[in-house]
Amino acid sequence: MKKLFQILILITAFQLQAQNPVPAPKQSKSVLLMNGFLHIGNGKVIENSIVGFRNGVIDLVGDALVTKIDPAKYDTVINIAGKHIYPGFIIPNSTLGLAEVEAVRATLDFNEVGTINPHVRSLIAFNADSKVNSTMRTNGVMYCQVTPRGGLISGTSSVVSLDSWNWEDAVLKMDDGVHLNFPKSQSGSSRRGEEEKKEPAVSQYEIQLNDLKKFFTDSKAYNLNPAKEEKNLRFEAMKGIFNGTQNLYIHTDYVKDILAAVNLCKEFGIKKIVLVGARDAWKVTKELKAANASVMINRVHDLPEKNDDDIDLPYKLAYLLQKDSVLFCLQTAGDQEAPGARNLPFLAGTACAYGLTKEQALMSISYNTAKILGVETKAGSVEQNKIATLFVSEGDALDMRTNKVLYAFIEGRKLNLKNSQEIQYEKYLKKYGVK
């Protein structure tokens, strides 16, 4: 009995040590940030700014040299001269909150059984208490598009904040769009060996494409029929795609498939198109602009896919789309994508070295992302009447050497920036007497 009691004490101590920071309470005191270098997020900057917010909403943005303000009107005044203010970064197409440890299958909840699952909602599986979430905020990532995986149609994504008690509290935009993994007309790549570039049987591609067209035809007819005999959850989930209230996120990479996907959308009258990955998007920018399609670029820190690709193509793809005025944002899907999402600002920093300006790169992880996800009136930039989700950094937040978040706020709530990794770091510094 004594031994059992000791074991219980040890387990309890371990669980307490492993706890995440408690979500911040609702903002009760107004805050004024003074004299910081403000990166608004929409391409503009204010070198000597004042930013005020109360009740979770920004009520003041201005130039300290022009705008007269009585600091006494705010409960808390913080002088951040020499520091930088940024809007909270947004990570799209992510499994954050759906994956804890990639090597442990029981912690993965982003893939459902079946091929066509538009009715599967990633939101209700989102784990707001994930230990991974708190590590995002340390680098300025405040919002996430929680996205399902697998099948031909994976399911429906939602946009959430990364500081909440549960998924209901976390919601910024519920069910923002449906995710389609477009059939591949070819597989593999010529860069990775001859054995990988064999094309699959044409019939398999055609079977998948025909299945997809049949589902779109049936679901559109179902949603146009006011007198439905019985409810079909899969067809119901496609309603927003056809009436233009939801995005269709098409995961595809190559020219032939991109054009086929755009034509499919045209055939069924789908207006809100977002290509995800889209390695070859730079080759068909005219067609994308004509279709009013936007792009979530593949991970910037990647290798070229084909033998004849420029070696720096993944780095400069953002610039190529910017040059041709295609709306785009950055994402980090791939191996270790949940824990690796914290590096989102540094991907934008790399894009700066390959053609983008600093503010264009910032837009690709803030305002552009918000616009693509349909939340630009709430988030993505530091502007009046928007949600007060922002942070203060010691230096340039797109540079891993100077990204040091000093203050962070989600909906005006001041965040505890500690995470389990920092706690362990400090613990062992003390153990070995390192300063």
Image: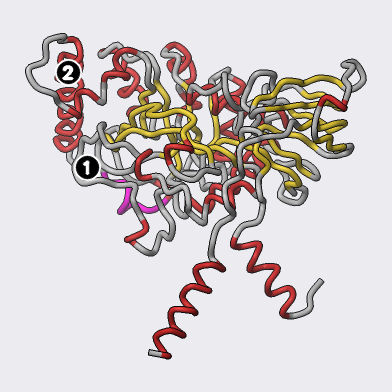
Q: Residue at x 37, y 13 (%)?
A: 271
Which residue is disc 2 drawn over? Answer: 217
Q: Nearer the viewer, residue 132 or 331?
A: 132
Q: Earlier in the sequence, mark 1 or mark 2?
A: 1
In the rendered image, residue 274, in percent from the top left (x then y), is placed at: 42, 25
In the rendered image, residue 268, in percent from the top left (x then y), is placed at: 26, 14
Which amino acid type is shown beneath numbered disc 1? Pro
Q: Which mark is residue 200?
A: 1
Total numbered badges shown on the rendered structure: 2
Q: Residue at x 15, y 16 (%)?
A: 222
Q: Secondary structure at mark 2?
A: helix
Residue 288 visible in the shown view:
yes
Q: Secondary structure at mark 1?
A: loop
In the rendered image, residue 55, in percent from the top left (x then y), is placed at: 65, 28
Left or right, 312 with reference to 251: right
Q: Which residues are magenta?
A: 192-198
In the rendered image, residue 386, in percent from the top left (x then y), is placed at: 63, 22
Left or right, 41 with reference to 61: left
| Quarter location, residue 246 | top left
Left or right, 333 with reference to 341: left
From this view, report whether residue 125 is shown above or below residue 389.
Answer: below
